Image (cartoon, grey):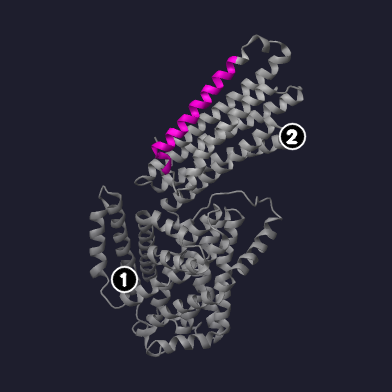
Amino acid sequence: MNWALLIQVLGGLGIFIYGMKLLSESLQRVAGDRLRSFLSSMTKNRVSAVFSGIFITATIQSSSATTVLVVGFVNAGLMALSEAVGVIMGANIGTTITAWIVSFLGFKFNIASFALPAISAGMVLHFSKRESRSGWGSFLIGFGFLFLGLDYLKSSVPDSAKDPETFQFLQQYTNMGFNTILLFVLIGALLTIIIQSSSASTTITITLAFSGYIPIDAAYGMILGENIGTTITANLAAIAGNRNAKKAALAHTMFNVFGVIWALLFFKQFTGLIDSFVPGDPLVDKEGTRFHISLFHTMFNITNTLLLIWFVNTLSKFVSKIVDSVASKTTGDKDSIRFLQAGSVKTTELAMVELTEFTKKIIRETYDFLRLTEQLLLQPYDATKVVQVLKKEEELDLVRSQVMTYLNEIQESGVTGNFGKDVLGIMERVKAVEEMGDNFASIARKVRKAHRQKIALDKTFSHQIKEQVELLKHHYDVLITNLEKSESFDILGNPQIRNQSREYRFQMIRSIKKNESKVKKKRYQKKSNFMPALLYRDVSRNLDNISRLLNAAIYADV
């Protein structure tokens, strides 16, 4: 084996993948919020969902990043499974643009002539203090590295006519008829799983076919395999996710596997149709193979989408049935939300999207604490509700630990621009939510103990508790209602919202002080009256703490 050549190939592949990663990450930094808003607004029906998937993937040049983002949305409950399937279909089409860029530019022009100037210009912009300019600088650097890596790949893979011995071992697998196609489907899938980039494996396929090392049918087989291999990233991301995340990832896999099956069944007819559209015989004209492969890649995904777009709901129900049947045999919680790990496409932008939505969801879910606590305090005692509150409090403790671990991972990967402020804001909010859970659990324990000691609040204290609980409900509404209007926590910086929060906080303080003075009255010093008064005082202090923490969650970015 020619080790020097192998090192050159791996080095070129590494530069290509790094360029693709940098290009994708920089675009997410520059336009991430707008793309996310676009994705949210353009998934109202299956057709618009497909087009949004095409647009976003073509823009950020990474179907893996798009599918991981979609899985994250489904995991956070922001997107229905049927909508996610449409976006995934579009992502498969959008990713084919890379093959066309490589085919038109990568083999015809002197790549170094525009790759190096792009890197030079990118370096100048990269050190700009303005976040947007720095992002575009990173984009140009990634663009330059992508084509520089392609240039190394081209030069490292010699022409088969001039150096037939180098990849001679491939020849023994190219004359096995249909088994050759099946073998190269497997090779394409394994290659994409290993390098976790369908764009890189597609580029390798085009390079090998262009250089004459594999026949066109084997190249078609590799393209089919790469469509299966590319689903690994979303499935890896969904492992730590909830059932809905797993359903979205499985739908991606089922969609691509179905496409490969029909493409293999009608291989001759389909490839014959493709070859008829592109001038030149791909068996003879190596120059034209890149266009045959690019068109095959595009038409395969378009045809697969046209076939299955009418069965999105059926596919969603099918994967739901599979995941639910498997999950029912495990301890997995159907409704719980867990963090995802996006593997090689994980970026600060994607991580912050996921973390923001996660935090917003647990804030909404803590409202259940208030509902259960109100029932415990104002309705006949129910031991099951105490258990529910205590269980939720344990889950919140675990969530805080997960958030801190995840934030450390984000910070280690590098936090840029305004993300530093966002990270601190999320840390404060999660801390506030977890402490609110502690106070709700404290109330539940006190109610349980009081029930065992046959201590109950009288009508006066119950009325005061109800008044304070109503104040908390209004305070919660200020937080939750405004979060629903925005995709980030920036809306909480609105002075009007903060004034509302501060007013509810002051009302709670006034209520506590007014009612605590009643506790000190002599008629409550009798033992029969003192114990309910003591229970009220302890519970009202917990409610006061919750009010303070709600205010802290709104003011967290200050």
The answer to whether 29 is drawn above or below residue 263 in the figure is above
Ranked by sequence position, the earlier of labels 2 and 1 is 1
Element marked by disc 2: loop
Q: Position of residue 362 (x, y in %)?
A: 55, 43
Residue 492 is a magenta residue: yes
Q: Position of residue 78 (x, y in %)?
A: 53, 54
Amino acid found under the numbered disc labelled 2: Asp
Residue depicted at x 48% and y 85%: 271
The answer to whether 122 is drawn above or below residue 217 in the figure is above
Disc number for residue 382: 2
Q: How many marks?
A: 2
Q: Position of residue 356 (x, y in %)?
A: 47, 47
Disc number for residue 151: 1
The front one of 29 and 228 is 29
- In the rendered structure, which segment of residues is drawn in magenta? 491-517
Element marked by disc 1: helix
Query: Which residue is the extreme one toward the top?
Result: 522
Residue 197 visible in the displayed image: no
The answer for how far apart the CA atoms under marks 2 and 1 are is 71 Å
Residue depicted at x 51% and y 85%: 270
Quadrant location, the N terminus: bottom left
Residue depicted at x 37% and y 90%: 280
Residue depicted at x 47% and y 30%: 503
The reply to whether callout 2 and callout 1 are in contact (CB within 8 Å) is: no
Amino acid found under the numbered disc labelled 1: Asp
**Residue 458 falls left or right of residue 159:** right
**Residue 536 falls left or right of residue 148:** right
Binning the other alpha carbons within 10 Å of mark 2 as few (below 14), some (14 to 19) or many (20 upward) gives: some
Residue 429 is a magenta residue: no
Q: Position of residue 432 (x, y in %)?
A: 51, 34
Main secondary structure along the magenta-highlighted residues:
helix
